[in-house]
Image (cartoon, rainbow, N blue to C red):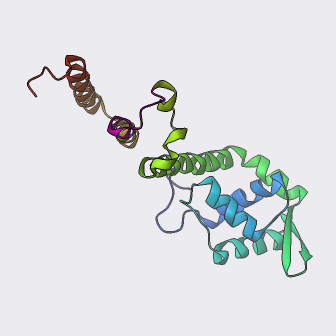
Amino acid sequence: MGGGGFRMGRKFASGDLQLVILALLVEQPRHGYELIKLLEERSGGFYVPSPGVIYPALTYLEETGLADVESEGTKKLYRITESGRRLVEENRSMIDMTLGKLEKIGAKMAHVRRIFDPESRSSDRDEDVFPEDKSEVAAARMLLRSALRLRYPWSKDEAKRIAGILERAAGEILAGGRSGN
């Protein structure tokens, strides 16, 4: 995966995708369509591989003896072989890192959806602290949290700037509107 991030356009190099597919086959045998849906789900919709990407990768895995295929009518069920399992174990750290990135992206995508979907806000952690707050304050709190997450990680100077903003806001809240407004 090169520099530790996703590539523009294609999200994976073909070898990386094949390893991820094998790791998913370790969990259980799967059809190509299931693999597409699983990658979409784990990434929160960020990565939805096309059949034109998944099926050639599965064919390669079958041809190289890393996966077996069994026909079920018009569908094919793919299973990992012993040599495929060994390859997964040899590359476990890279696979875990890649799947972790997908899941982190999925969590961020879910968070953004919650911000823009008022019906899903009840799952937000602030609900435990302010259970009755369905107001503009709740929406502003969520927007603030989102802004902080999107800006993170920040430099030392940026951290000082953000802290100053938050301290001023807290001061105005504590003043109860006595700051001249």
Residue, x 27% and y 31% (percent of image)?
Answer: 162
Q: Is residue 158 left or right of residue 80?
A: left
Q: How many marks?
A: 0
* Quadrant in the picture for the N terminus: bottom right
Q: Report the side of 56 relative to 82 (left or right).
A: left
Please tell me whether residue 48 is drawn above or below residue 160 in the rendered image.
Answer: below
Residue 132 position in % (x across, y down): 45, 30
At horizontal 59% and vertical 51% (from top left) the residue drawn is 102
Quarter containing the C terminus: top left
Q: Is residue 151 magenta?
A: no
Q: Quadrant of residue 48?
A: bottom right
Residue depicted at 66% across the width and 62% down the height: 17
Q: Which of the two residues, 77 or 124, is positioned nearer the viewer here?
A: 124
Is residue 16 in view? no
- Residue 169 seen by the camera: yes
Look at the picture and state if 66 lies above or below 107.
below
- In the rendered structure, which segment of residues is drawn in magenta? 130-142
What residue is shown at x 19% (from left), y 17% (from top)?
175
Is residue 138 covered in magenta?
Answer: yes
Measuring from the top left, give residue 34's x and y in whole percent.
Answer: 75, 65
> Looking at this rendering, what residue extends furthest in the front direction?
132
Q: Position of residue 73 (x, y in %)?
A: 90, 80
Outermost residue, left direction? Answer: 180
Q: Residue furthest bottom?
A: 74
Along the line of sight, the residue nearer the viewer: 142 or 25: 142
Observer-nearest residue: 134 or 12? 134
As displayed, is residue 53 above or below residue 84? below
Give x and y (percent) for residue 26. 82, 53
